[in-house]
Amino acid sequence: MSFTIQNILIPSDRAYEMVDVQIVDDHIAAIAPNLDPIGTLIDGRNKLLLPGFVNAHTHSSEMWQRGMIPPVPLELWIAELYDFTPLDPEKAYLSAIGTAVETLLSGGTSVVDHLVLIPGQELETIEAAVRAYRQVGIRAFVAPLIQDQALSTGLPSGGANREHDEYVRSTAATLALVQEAVTQFHRPDEGVNILVAPTGMQLCSDALFEGCIELSDRYHLCRHAHLLETKAQQILAQEKYGCSAVEHLKQIGFLGDRTSLAHCVWLDDADIEIMAATKSTVVHNPLSNLRLGSGIAPVLKYRQAGVNVSFGCDGSASNDSQDLLEAIKIGSILHNTTDPDYQNWITPRHAIEMASLGGATGLNLGDQLGSLTVGKKADLIMVDLMNLSLLPRTDPIGLLILGRPVNAISHVWVNGRAVVSDNEVCNVNVDELRQSLFDQSQWNPKRQAPSVAQMELHYRSVMGLSAKPLGYS
Ligand SMILES: [Zn+2]
């Protein structure tokens, strides 16, 4: 399948230029003015072509709880989330479809789904998400979320002697599960990738990390985890290792150029040096960090230190949407408040590069994806510059990032295949999706999470808050 996009605007070094772009099969074959047309012709007038973005960290099944969890910090939020996680793989399928559709319509051509697994139906959950992503046609990086320690171990002890339950699945069984997921589903040539993805140091043993490293090396898998999202995790790392979590992950060999780490809010200067030296990627999830009160990641420092940074929406229960353009906007301008030297601030063009090439680099695919370069994969988005939210004509990229684009992504191609065309998703009946999401949910503004009730007093104690509970218990 070949096609030619004619008279399309693309960013050039200093401004924009009008070109034709030829796509042959899965890759960009030529970019130049007035090319000989090949294949189907697509009118690019009054449109802007960009490399597709990467939604570099999300949890698709959280869609079932978006807008629902009250404003509480991560450690309480996650207890509430787990109490009400959907237990039906068909729901996992629907929320993966929904996550993919929202990602595509906000400029994403790839999604990293740190997928929460249904206990006892782990492979069925992965199968459901993979089926959804294959159907939609988005490039999928499915990262089965694993841990081998009980949720209560994720809180610092504060010196208290606390008893913890055994986790429901052994470390060995968990690693065997990931191995099986690789065998069944890891098909990079078909746009489906499995990652090793321990949830983070707060809930994982070294044995689990080391098993993941071994699988990653054996099958050339990327590595993904949460890292120092909250102040509580920083305290926990000192209790657990006697050093920072970053130092520990370096020592056990988890960091590297195939490793992307979500959040990275509580890193100090020494940690940042390690991130740069190991070529690890930071996935910035600004909306989740604000929603959960986690803090502001030192993204300008990362950039100055040469650390690769990409953007993620994070799951829809801590954001509570999958609008990648919104995450890119907030994740850029948020940092203007952290450094008075405006020469360090993130410009709209920087933001585009972080979202595309930065995302690809974090998945060890910077040589194949993430820029408008002849020979690279045709993962492309086309922006409608006649869209009301992008008028009047000023700077297209400036307004795309700093404005509030509404339904502005008119076309999306992944691996040279159209997945959004004339603002319509090609492979999903969105009306049916809306009806299914409606039918399988209910208005439910009030609910009680028993796990939060159990954890709240301890959380308040170790974080130095007054003993007054919020009302969970
Ligand atoms: Zn997350």
Image (cartoon, helix red, strand yellow):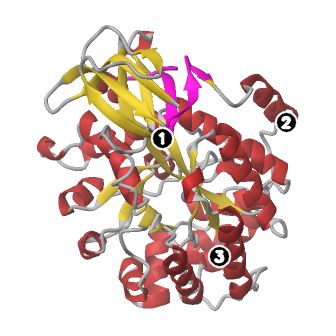
Q: Would you say residue 402 is visible in this rendering?
A: yes
Q: Residues within 10 Å of mark 2 (few under 14, many from 20)?
A: few
Per the image, the residue denoted by label 2 is 442
The answer to whether residue 282 is above or below residue 167 is: above
Q: Toward the viewer: 424 or 19?
A: 19
Foreground of the two, 413 or 28 = 28
Is disc 1 surrounded by few (<14), some (14 to 19) or many (20+) residues within 10 Å? some
Is residue 437 positioned above or below 131 on the image? above
Q: Which residue is mark 1?
A: 26
Q: Which residue is mark 3?
A: 147
Q: Nearer the viewer's eye, disc 1 or disc 2? A: 1
Of marks 3 and 2, which one's residue comes earlier in the chain? 3
**What's the residue at 80%, 27% (across, down)?**
432
Which-is-in-front pick, marks 1 and 3? Answer: 1
Spot occupied by residue 168 in the image (x, y as percentages of width and height): 79, 79
How far is the residue under mark 3 from the one under mark 2? 30 Å
Give SS at disc 2.
Answer: loop
